[in-house]
Amino acid sequence: MSKPKFKNPVVNWIDYRLPIFTFMNHELNEYPTPKNLNYFWNFGSLAGITLVIMIVTGIVLSMNYTAHIDYAFDSVERIMRDVNHGWLLRYIHMNGASFFFIVVYIHIFRGLYYGSYKAPREILWILGVLILLLMMATAFMGYVLPWGQMSFWGATVITNLFSAIPLVGESIVTWLWGGFSVDNPTLNRFFSLHFVLPFVIVGVVILHLVALHRFGSNNPIGIDVKGKQDTIPFHPYYTIKDLFGLSVFATVFAAAVFFFPNFMGHPDNYIPANPMVTPAHIVPEWYFLPFYAILRAIPDKLGGVLFMFGAIMVLFVLPWLDKSSVRSSQFRPLYKLFFWFLVIDCIALGYLGAMPAEGIYVVLSRLATAYYFFHFLIILPLLPKIESTRPLPVSISTPIITTSSNASTVMAMREKK
Amino acid sequence: MRFSKLVLYFLILFNFFLSKLALSAGKAIEYPDKNWSFSSIFGTFDKASAQRGFQVYKEVCAGCHGMRLISYRNLAALGYNQDELKAIASQFEITDGPNDDGEFFTRPGRTSDKFASPYPNKKAAIAANGGAYPPDLSLIIKARPNGANYLHALLSGYVEPPKNMKVPEGMYYNKFYSGNLIAMPQPLYEDGVEYLDGTKASPDQMAIDVTTFLAWASEPELEERKQLGITVILFLIVFSILSYFSMRQIWAPIKNKN
Amino acid sequence: MTNKNTPDDKNKRDFLQVSTYALGAVGAASFVWPLINQMNPAADTLALASTEVDLEQLEEGQAITVTWRGKPVFIRHRTKEEIASAKDQLLDGLRDPQTDDERVKNEKYIVLVGVCTHLGCVPLGQKSGDVKGEYGGWFCPCHGSHYDHSGRIRKGPAPTNLEIPQYSFLSDTLIKIG
């Protein structure tokens, strides 16, 4: 790596003045990555690719969409019926939202399982939670745009959450609406924000990557990289692995788009919005159900809203709630157990969010909500005091060397146990 | 690890199904499953049935129900040729305008026109039907859970009410309608239409045909979508296999070192 | 530094990996097509491609402008003199040589897309008070193109004659454009 860095003289000429190629070579090619990452580490790049797919399909949809209460529904149907490949673009965008959340939720739970939020990656984690919040806002506003019944009533219910704020709540809601109900001004501003927020997400994703590349990826063992023997260059090893992951993901995604495009949607959203009639069962999109369950579990309006937002806020301070110095659950038997309890709890909350708020479901929602906060606020801070962690390996390379042939590291760890 | 991974995927999938179940949990009524030709993975629309269904819509439903998202030209997908489409369109009076004198006028339909609406506006439709709005049928199959089976059941669900039940004036008893009281009188009777292709017009046949027609109207892209879907998925499977073996090959030196 | 060289067996590597990347490129390219194609005219736009016009009220020497595909279409009921002048014109010296007979279906009526072939402005000459240019037909005010009674370019920057839309006479006085 002496003077001429690149073979192509034009590239060298540009790079001398604008070191973009050096940057890319450093961050995407040579970038040293732990050699033992498992398939759960695919979901970061998948999330990035899904974001790009959403932005690209979103831009072309916006070329055919009309943000006006009288035309929005019909313009979407025109996309479905008349615009060339319109149905494809719209179904990709519509299902893409669900797949984006699937990918990001798996990405988040991977972080929880392997302790990726711990020092020195706290800011990386916080930026990730910020991306989740922005995604939620974007997804919510996007769902309003087709102006079906669920769009309208979802918008009404969610914006009304802000009315729970004491004193200024009502004024805030009126301000959000630009009127006295969800109406044309609301639709217009939601369209504008739905268009611009994804680019804000891109900005935060770039910061997320800067923070990631400061210390590099965490890994299934959770111990720091000790030297060059622990890492491999990102390209070609992880580029090809990400490509393989992408192809599998794309297959599942395509199956949904082409064969079950409305499976994750709600039939009521094919009825044009009617401000005079509320559908019998208002349910948010599946990715909001756990939060919706928490909202309904609390018998107080303001309390429900606070707990719902609290469920995300608690993630922001997670790095300081879990004080254990061991990252990966592989060496934390108790944490691992509670991690799975949390997964089950979140799924239970998702289920309860879809159920009517009556009878046993209310009780169960309250229990599940209580456990969610109990996990983060009580269990995690207490756990290091009572848990005896298993001995950590000396380095990433060490356990690999002692195992046989081509089984993955993680498999090897499991077998040795 | 593999195991817990599987568990996670399973739970996520399970969550979907649970929430879907939860959505339909509110509706206790079961509709008979008619195994529609278009509901299977490779399924297509039965064009002859859909054409008959269009006839049923035109002669029975269109008096009250509009289909404002569908144009006459769209019917080409059911197998009509251009001349037939022009003939069909010209049977309808379309309000157009304003003309050079600033007035609205009616003219025979063209293929580019949307289906003629039975009422000038929604308020008129409500007023003419005793306060109940006859919903637009363009998207009806997509806009109801289990739409095709639901519609077929609804059309066949007019039976004698239970003895102790009082059916108010202007309402009708239907065993498949939520709440059992529907403002729409029974629309389909034996030989209610005379099919052009000679098929016997039993109420069940008419219900099947009109459902097929409306399913097409809800999802006119269905056949193209499934066809393209098969190509795309085959492509992606081949690509997945290739990239898997490429990955194995690239990773071989790393794995072999151990 | 870790050894980032891939296997020595270059042929085998090339075949598998090159075909993977090639297939990936094909996939990405086919995904781009719908993104581009959605900007082409949609099915409903294409369906609006014909307009019918009744010419019964159109007196000799009058012209009307109708809209077809979002563009103005000029229809002029020509006078005897205009027809004669259009017919007598020799083809020599015309920039885009065409006889008047090639440009009309019924010599009384000339039907033209009213868009200057230079850069798309709408020429003057439909109304009686309009400037009609040196050849009495139409005159484009943007860059000074002069058209004759047959809509042929005679002077100015426009490269070709005014376009004739596809049209047909459904009866003596009813035409269908498109």
Image (spheres, helix red, strand yellow):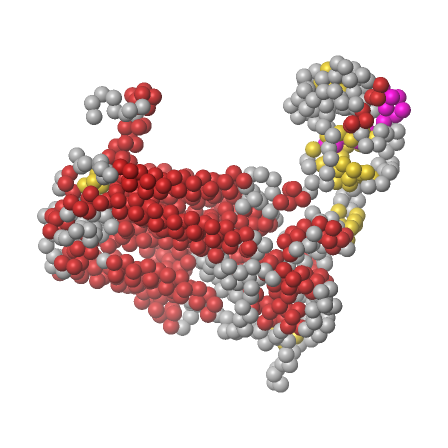
Q: Residue B62: x, y in percent? A: 70, 61
Q: As drawn, which residue projects farthest toward the bottom?
A: B163
Residue C78 is covered by the magenta coloring:
yes
Foreground residue, B100 or B213? B213
Residue A252 is covered by the magenta coloring:
no
- Does the rendering let one see residue B101? no
Foreground residue, A240 or B152? A240
Question: Residue drawn 15% across and 45% down?
Answer: B257
Question: Residue drawn 35% across and 60% down?
Answer: B12
Q: Which residues are magenta?
A: C72-85
Q: Residue A189: x, y in percent? A: 50, 43
Q: Split into 4 quadrants, where in the image is the C terminus of chain C?
A: top right
Quadrant assignment, res C90: top right
Q: Residue B148: x, y in percent? A: 57, 65
Question: Residue drawn 38% across and 47% down?
Answer: B239
- Does the rendering let one see residue B115? yes
Q: Is residue B157 left or right of residue A288?
A: right
Q: Is residue C73 left or right of residue C22?
A: right
Quadrant assignment, res C59: top right
Q: Split into 4 quadrants, where in the image is the N terminus of chain C?
A: top left
Q: Is residue B120 left or right of residue B7?
A: right
Quadrant assignment, res B79: bottom right
Q: Above or below — where is A392 with respect to A215?
A: below
Q: Above or below — where is C101 with respect to A282?
A: above
The number of numbered discs placed on residues in the rendered structure image is 0
Q: Residue A198: x, y in percent? A: 42, 42
Question: Residue drawn 69% across and 75% down?
Answer: B169
